[in-house]
Amino acid sequence: GESVGLHLPTLSVQEGDNSIINCAYSNSASDYFIWYKQESGKGPQFIIDIRSNMDKRQGQRVTVLLNKTVKHLSLQIAATQPGDSAVYFCAENGDYKLSFGAGTTVTVRA
Amino acid sequence: SAVISQKPSRDICQRGTSLTIQCQVDSQVTMMFWYRQQPGQSLTLIATANQGSEATYESGFVIDKFPISRPNLTFSTLTVSNMSPEDSSIYLCSGLKEGGEQFFGPGTRLTVL
């Protein structure tokens, strides 16, 4: 079966630095991925998505990269702020059903 | 995207009892889903709530344990039946509009003693 996972469970970042969160997937047929941010006590919040016909997509302060050759995607956050402290999940969207990775906890140091 | 609310936000229940969680969306959505998030872990899809018909359950989840209703395009309920401590989790509802992204409610934190 398919699986979606993250390389590291935690990431500590200095405020102002860039953050990179990685995710690997196993199903080569996966074609739609989403990054979510979950703050403590809240539900996941959509950040950005990417389809397999793209290898890069940019949003506000965020960039998602997709490498289909090695089945890897990453989320880059520019100029990380204290409000970016949260758990970040990658998810594979298969017919609208989401398969979530394990999550990376990002802590921003002042 | 729309806004989802859930009731209750949290509850502490005795084993063997049942709890019904309500999910209300402030506008019509095409699809609604229920997820479970065990403490410190990721989200797992329980089922797709189908309007006017039986929910579609994922592997490992059954209707007798997690009956779901969806009477209209903005409302759904999930019941956790005959609870045990292993059911202690956060239960999250999500909605999806045509062409939009899937968005989540705040979750219901359930503790079973």
Image (cartoon, rainbow, N blue to C red):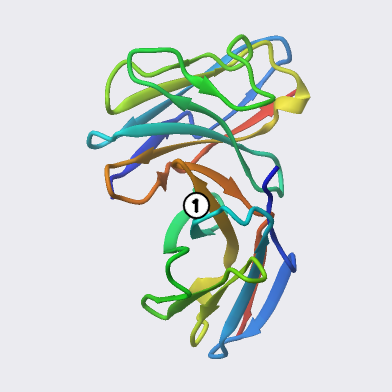
Give the residue type at disc 1.
Answer: Pro
Horizontal side of residue B48 vs B3, given as left or right: right
Q: Chain of mark 1?
A: A
Horizontal side of residue A21 vs B39, given as left or right: left
Q: Residue at point 27% right, 43% down? A: B98
Residue at the spot of label 1: A44
User: Circle 1 sits in a helix, a strand or a loop, which is it?
Assistant: loop
> Which percent across, then down, holds residue B92?
51, 37
Q: Residue at point 71% right, 49% down? A: B40
Image quadrant assignment for residue B25: top left
> Which percent across, then down, holds residue A4?
66, 54
Image quadrant assignment for residue B73: top left
> Which percent across, then down, holds residue A90?
57, 59
Q: Residue at point 75% right, 19% down? A: B84
* Of residues B64 and B53, the one drawn nearer to the viewer in this rendering: B53
**Picture mark count:** 1
Quarter holding the N terminus of chain A?
top right
Q: Residue at point 67% right, 70% down? A: A70
> Which percent across, then down, holds residue B112?
71, 24
Residue lying furthest left: B27
Label 1: how many Cα within 10 Å (few below 14, some 14–19, many 20+):
many
